[in-house]
Every structure is written in C-alpha cells, then in structure tokens.
Image (spheres, coloured by chain):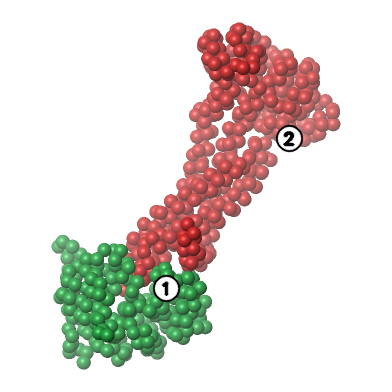
Chain colours: A green, B red
Amino acid sequence: MTQNPAIIVQQVDHYFGSGQLQKQVLFDINLQIESGEIVIMTGPSGSGKTTLLTLIGSLRSAQSGSLKILGQELCQASRDTLTQARRNNGYIFQAHNLHGSLTALENVQMGLEVHGSMLKAERHERAAEMLKKVGLEDRLHYLPSGLSGGQKQRVAIARALVSHPKIVLADEPTAALDKKSGRDVVDIMHDLAKQQGCTILLVTHDNRILDIADRIIYMEDGRLSKQPEAVS
Amino acid sequence: MLGFIQTLKQRTPLGLLQLKHDRMRLLTAIAGITFADVLIFMQLGFSDALLRTNTQYPRNLQADLVIISTQAKNFGQLRTFTRRRLYQAQDVPGVADADALYIGSADWRNPQTREETSMLILGQNPERPALNLPEVNQQLEAIRQPDTVVFDQASRGDYSTMIEQVNQGEFVTTEIGLRTVTVAGLFTVGASFADDGALITSDQNFLRLFPRRDAGTVSLGLIHLEPGYDPEQVQADLAERLPDDVLVLTHEGYIDFELAEIQSNSPVGFVFSLGTAMGFIVGTVIVYQVLSTDVNSHLAEYATFKAMGYRNSYLLGIIFEEALILTLFGFMPGMAISIVAYQLTEAATALPMLMPFSRTVIVFLLTLVMCTFSGAIATRRLQAADPADIF
C-alpha cells in the first residue's frame, strides 16, 4: 500500500491585517509530510512557525496556494469544513489548557466526545486506558489544580491522542517544563504516536528534544529552508 | 425527542461542573436570582391583594345589573345618585326589583384599643341581602336592631379580645361618630388599602350613622332580573330609559370597571408593575454578571474546545445549561422565601396574600427568560474565543 502524504502544502502565502497595515508573514511555503513521519519545525520567534501550524491545524483559513490535509483541500474552506477537519487532529499546546472544572479523566474524554459517536461509559473507559499509558492511572479523578506541570502536560497529550488522530500538532509542548518532565513528555508522545502510526508536526525551540524527529525543518522570516545551516 | 434526551444523557455536564467548581460564584448567582424572585413575588402578591381586596365587595354583589353614578370612581368613592332612578328602572321590562345599597367610610373606635380607625360601612336592605356572604346573611335579624352592626373579623388591627367576646355571644359596644353601636356578629372578608376593615348593617342604621346622607341618595343600585331576560338587553334598555347621570353595568362589567379604575387611575397598579420590572432587571443584571465572568474566565478552555473541533453551538449549550441550572436553583429558594413572606405579610397587614399556581408558573417563566436572556448576552463574549490565538 502506497503511503499518501498526510500534509501537502504548496505555494502558501499568508497575510495578517488588511489595507496599508497588511503584512505578509508566510512566503511561498512548500512542505510535504508523509504519514507516520515525525517532523520538528524550528526557527526564531516571530518567523511564522505557529502561523503555519494553525493553518495546517485548520485553526485559520489558508488564503492562497494549496493546503491538503489527509487529502482534503482546506484553502479558502468554510468555517464548518474547518471545524470538521479539526476533529482529525490532536493538539498539544504550550499551556496545557485543561479545563479547570473537569478531572483528568473528564478532560481526556472530551477528546472523544467531540466525535459524538461513543457512549459515555465507553469514552471514560478509553480515557482511563489512555491516562494509564501516560502513567497517570492513579490520578484519574484529580482536577488539573492538583497536578504538577508535567502531569498536566501528560493529560493534555492523552487528550490529544485518545481519539487516535491521524495528525498531531504540538506547539512548544516542553517550554513550560523542566528537563526531566520535558523529556518524559516528548518520549510519551513519540512512543504513542509510533504505536498509533500518526503524523507529528512539532514546533519547538528546545534543542534537547530534536533527536525524536525523523526530519527537521527550519523557518526564518516566513520562509522554509529544507537544509538549514543552523541545524545539521 | 428520545434521541435528544439520549444525547443529553451522554453529554458531559460541563455547565453543571463549571458552576459546582466555583461555589462562591454559584452562591452569588443563586442569591441574586432568589432576591429577584422574592421581589417579583412580593410585587405580584401585593398587586393581586390590591386588586382582590378592592373588588371583594363588588365581586360578592348579588345582582344581575348594577347602577352607579357617572361620577363614580371606585367602590369606596361611588358618589351618589337619586333613588328615583331605581324606581324608574322598575318600569323597564325584565327588571324584577331594584334595591339601594348605601356605602360610606367612617371612623370608629376600636372597642379593644380605643383607637380611631377608618371603616367601610355598608347599609343594605335586610329583606334582600346585597352581598353573597353567607355569614352576613345568617345575621340579617341582628342588623335590623337599631345601631347594630356585623364586623369583618379580618380587619386590620388588634381585635382579638373583642372577637372572643362576640363569639361567646356577648354584645360589644363602641362609638361611631356620636352614636353608640353594638357589634352583634362577625363575618370574614379582609381589609383593603383604603379602609382598615368593614361593618355591615341595615339601610336604616346606615342613615342613622350618617346623618348627612338621606334615603333618597343611594350609592349603588342592585337590579335583579326576571327569569328569561338577557342581562345585556335589559342593560341597553335601562341605559336608554334612564338619564345619563347614572351608568348601568352588568355584574362582570362592574367588576371590570373597578379593576380598570385601580389599574389605570391609582398609582399603586403602576408602582407594582414597576417593582416587578425592577426585580426582573436586577435579576438579569446579576445573572449576566455571573455568566459573563464565567465565560471570561474560561475563554482559553473554550478556545481549546474549539480547536479540538467543538462547534460554537456546543459552547452555547454550556452557557444555557448554566442558565437553566441557575433558574432552577434560584427559583426554588425564592419561592420558599416568598411563601413565608406572604404569610408574614398576611399576618401583619390582613391583606389576602395568595400564592396561586399560575403565579408560580409565571415567575418561573420570568426567571427562565431572565437567565436565558442574560445567557444570550453573555454568549457574545464567546466570539472572543479564537482557537488560533491560543497556540
């Protein structure tokens, strides 16, 4: 079976603002990521990494060029299509963004509820399994306020991966963590993603985690360079 | 419908969990709604008591048609018209008889406390009782006696010993103006806003108590029809026959006249409507404050949900769920407190504070509208939850 690329980005330009204040932030982006590939995108702040990530994650609508995610063209897509497309992805943010009123288990099962196809009991069972995989089986009913930073980020990973997404998008998942928990979090992400065969695009400044990548891409001033001198 | 309930059961009750998580905020909201509901209940209760007490005698009139002066304002201020109109009315086909009712207000001395207070006094023909009050109609013999009255035991003020004495068959005497009157019996109607209580007596006794009124000027005419006549037809005939210094109304028409008078001409009706509106607005503001703070403090979480693929409608659902929970938990204590407050008010003022089922439904619906409306304004903040901003 031939592996279709999970993400194909062709000639994407992106602008913020309008009129005289319009500013181009992405220039002629071309990127192809195969299914199951782990790609790390790095580069200085303000280079447009996060913007590209939000485009690929259908959080923003692409303005020009072509953006195919899992075979679906998302350039100029409607809001509804975008919302639908988001459900195929798992997101891990720099801040964990867990819901403060929900326990770890309830937070994780929110990743399944969005699909609306599973009964509550089943969702909770799957969420518990997932939390076990990230090593939090004894913290199922803790509220986020009762968890450490690393534990919260692991809950967030469980939430992102519980629905077995085809693509996982992560933005600085280790930025708020110390070296040990940062490493743990990335390892868990890596192992689970490999088991589930999902594609990972990870934006980071953290040099300590570059080794998990199959490929590293570099962005500067809104342009991608495939063979950056900075990272070799 | 079944599918919808199934969906609800399977849904994580986020609104409930959010409210439970922040107890202080929940309590503030519930206290606010409770306060608003009590305010609304009290205003509606007073307004209803006003309408009820000021129309109790009109409602209880035993007549098919009622004649009043065109100058009449309300039951307490009916003015008078000449008795000749009643004799003229008896000419009209269909009229069986026409009786006079004399109404006036006078200060009487509370036999117990010796304080002077304003009483409504009705003088009726003891042969044909004017009111549909069985307690009064059993004592018609008593009021035939000179200077003898029956007393409304629900009158405002302290009459406990006097009521006790009357119940034991003693005659209690007191003064109205310069005359000494005997209280021979009791009945129960209740005070109104205008008068602290009421006395019923015969027309002869009434004229003795009000020396400046004479038998020829009556307050209200009661027309009884012969069987088989249409009240509206006879009403039209009477209006045709009688000069236009009097107004002929059906019994219902007369009650409506009293209600309309209170609602439009007395400031009290307006005040209570305003009070109800204020309660509603206070409630809306408090619930809005709570819900919008709640939305604000969860913006990042909501944006995350949007990024995960949840639709806006899901988030709207959370806020309306909160609104519904607040409605329920704010309404119930509000109603409980109001029932107690009604009893206290009734004990203190002798106003009939009733809690009809229809009013609880109306206030519940008002609360629901209040919460949903505030929720709807609060959801505008949701637009600010942009998933692209949280990366």
Give the left or right position of residue A185, taking residue B183 as reference: left
Residue B310: x and y in percent read 37, 67
Q: Are marks 2 and 1 on the same chain?
A: no
**Foreground: B358 or A207?**
B358
Can residue A103 be seen? no
Secondary structure at badge 1 equals: helix
Q: Which amino acid type corresponds to the residue marked 1 in the rendered image?
A: Leu
Mark 1 surroundings: few (<14), some (14-19) or many (≥20) residues within 10 A: many
Q: Indicate the chain on which mark 1 is placed.
A: A
Mark 2 surroundings: few (<14), some (14-19) or many (≥20) residues within 10 A: few
Q: Indicate the chain on which mark 2 is placed.
A: B
Q: CA distance from mark 2 to mark 1?
A: 70 Å
Check if mark 2's residue and mark 1's residue have beta carbons within 8 Å: no
| Residue lying at 66% horizontally and 40% vertically, measured from the top left | B346
Quarter holding the C terminus of chain B is bottom left
Residue B207 image-quadrant placement: top right
Secondary structure at badge 2 equals: loop
| Residue lying at 68% horizontally and 32% vertically, measured from the top left | B190
Q: How many numbered circles does the render carry?
A: 2
Residue A138: x and y in percent read 52, 83
Q: Is residue B88 above or below residue B169?
A: above
Q: Is residue B79 above or below residue B60?
A: above
Nearer the viewer's eye, disc 2 or disc 1? 1
| Tag of residue B158 | 2
| Residue lying at 41% horizontally and 66% vertically, measured from the top left | B298
Q: Which amino acid type corresponds to the residue marked 2 in the rendered image?
A: Asp
Give the left or right position of residue B331, taking residue B298 as reference: right
Residue B19: x and y in percent read 50, 63
Give the left or right position of residue B88, taking residue A126 as reference: right
Q: Which residue is mark 1?
A: A112
Give the left or right position of residue A25, taking residue B150 as reference: left
Residue B63: x and y in percent read 64, 20
